[in-house]
Amino acid sequence: MNLSYQVFDLVLKHTFTIAHQSRDVQDTLIVKLEGDGFYGLGESTTNPFYGMTIENMTACLEKFRPVMETGSWKTPEELWELGREVFKENPFAQCALDMAAWDWFSKKEGKKLYEYLKLDPNKIPTTNFTIGIDTMQKMVDKMKEVHWPIYKIKLGTDNDLEIIRELRKHTDSAFRIDANCAWTAEQAIRNSEELAKLGVEFMEQPLGKDDLEGMKEVYKHSKLPVMADESCIVESDVKKCHGLFHAINVKLVKAGGITPGLRMIREAKSLGMKTMVGCMTESSVGITAIAHIAPLLDYVDMDGAMLLAKDPARGITITPEKVTFPEGNGIGAEIL
């Protein structure tokens, strides 16, 4: 088994701003596993908020290379367990490797990943399209540029309600809002009342990830369902979110890949919580991987590649009506 990787700079169509950062370019690491006549691709972006860099991701992969290349593992789950300790502090690197392992493994099995997982590709929820924080006019213009049935609106400004009021004038599409930890419990509860009237489906991560007491109040009094993102990073967080959130947003890069992501989804469902898988600003490698497990979900956020000026890979094609998968087995994405 051979391991290699490439770094790509993903240039965005527009500056992308959320409550705690802005960016025009996102660098990403694409991992390739080759063996037995097949190859698999996986991806993870860097993230300054979580301290994930190309340097520490590749260093972690190199540390694990001798174990991975022995080929002593038979399934992606076995490989993930072998890397549990090495990747403990770097789940982003483990995600890229795990994703590549699933791509390689399902190709070897002669199946698309969703087929191997026994999932129905016709049951994929419609992804939202994300509108980052900007001037009011630019946010309206971005929405008009891409007509979509569901918009995810990034908030965390001094005029959040005004933004939603203005955007609502220009579309009947459903809204989801993501405050990225920017509000207090009082603000979230108060804002939920008007947001519910403005056609918002749910609020994502309104409070800081450790504000558990505040979330108890929001969960109890909010007029809208609340979804965990920053509060639900790894598997052990799912149970902690029960009774504080109505749903969880699993980010594969933060969780460590598809393997733990599947376990998190199953656990949340067993607790009666709704589930979503969200993306970073990824190429079609990471986005196509998400699509394969999307039939398990109530919601999905896989618009990352749609926000790019140029995608270095090809994979799924997304329209409001359906998702079209690549012809090949495995995850099926390819670097151009």
Image: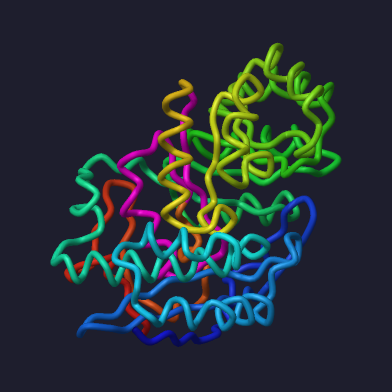
- Residue 132 sits in quarter: bottom right
Residue under the image location 45 percent in, 61 percent down: 80
**Looking at the image, which is closer to me, 204 or 328?**
328
**Quarter of the image that includes the N terminus:** bottom left
Magenta stretch: give its range.
273-301
Q: Is residue 49 above or below residue 154?
A: below
Residue under the image location 58 percent in, 65 percent down: 92
Which residue of the protein is positioned furthest toward the left in this rendering?
110
- Residue 122 located left or right of residue 210: left
Q: Is residue 217 above or below residue 235?
A: above
**In x, y percent, where is residue 302?**
45, 54
**In x, y percent, where is residue 205?**
68, 37
Magenta span contains residue 200: no
Residue under the image location 68 percent in, 39 percent down: 231
**Quarter of the image that includes the C terminus:** bottom left
Residue under the image location 80 percent in, 40 percent down: 182
Q: Is residue 120 above or below residue 282?
A: above
